[in-house]
Image (tube, rainbow, N blue to C red):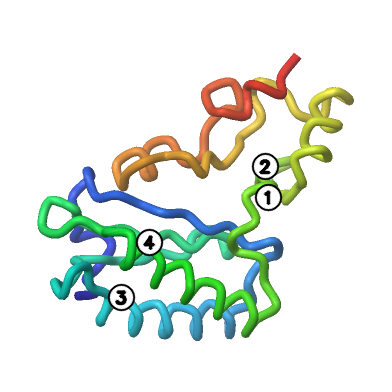
Amino acid sequence: MSVDFDALPGHSRIWIFQADRFLSTAERVELGRETEAFLGGWQAHGKALKAAYRIAERLFLVIAVNEAIQKATGCSLDALFHKVGEWEQKWGLALTNRRLTAYRSGGKIEIASWPAFEEAVQSGSITEETRVFDMTVPNKKAFQDHFETRAAQSWHKKYLV
């Protein structure tokens, strides 16, 4: 059952899919429509998942599930990742490439491969203070509070010298 993202509690589990490019307005509208339809029928063991989505920064598809009601299970997660794979094909996107990272540079969001990110750290253009997007946040509350954070406060710190 699809619900409003803001209606889900902070402990709701999330999955974040980062695109390899910014989505156009038309893509965001259609992706929203298709995500809403998918979540409306998304189930685990025959029980509806209370789920929501958000498209953030024209770059991130965020899926949230209130697992206090019904946990997402292997088959339901397979269905989600299968659907995301369909969207990747449909729009020529890479939404499941975990070797990309996004960060702010001069107020603008940049997308970099991990090697390119590491090179930017080495050159000094990325520092401890650089704002990064932490795809590892586990729940809605952490997403709201720490998704965009200082590099020194995220997993990105492993690249800092």
Q: What residue is rendered at 58% in x and 79% in y? A: 25
Whole-percent x and y of residue 18?
58, 57
Q: Earlier in the sequence, mark 1 or mark 3?
A: 3
Q: Which residue is mark 2?
A: 104
Tally of numbered tags: 4
Q: Which residue is mark 4?
A: 63
Q: Earlier in the sequence, mark 4 or mark 1?
A: 4
Between disc 2 and disc 4, the foreground one is 4
- Measure how far apart labels 3 and 4 are at the Cα level: 9 Å
Disc 4 vs disc 1: Cβ atoms closer than 8 Å?
no
Circle 1: element type: strand
Whole-percent x and y of residue 137?
42, 39
- Measure how far apart labels 1 and 3 are at the Cα level: 28 Å
- Checking the image for residue 109, the label placed there is 1
Q: Earlier in the sequence, mark 3 or mark 4?
A: 3
Q: What residue is rendered at 19% in x and 75% in y? A: 1
- The C terminus - image quarter: top right
Whole-percent x and y of residue 112?
76, 47
- Measure how far apart labels 2 and 3 are at the Cα level: 31 Å
In the depicted structure, whether residue 47 falls above or below residue 115: below
Give the residue type at disc 1.
Answer: Ile
Give the residue type at disc 4.
Answer: Ile
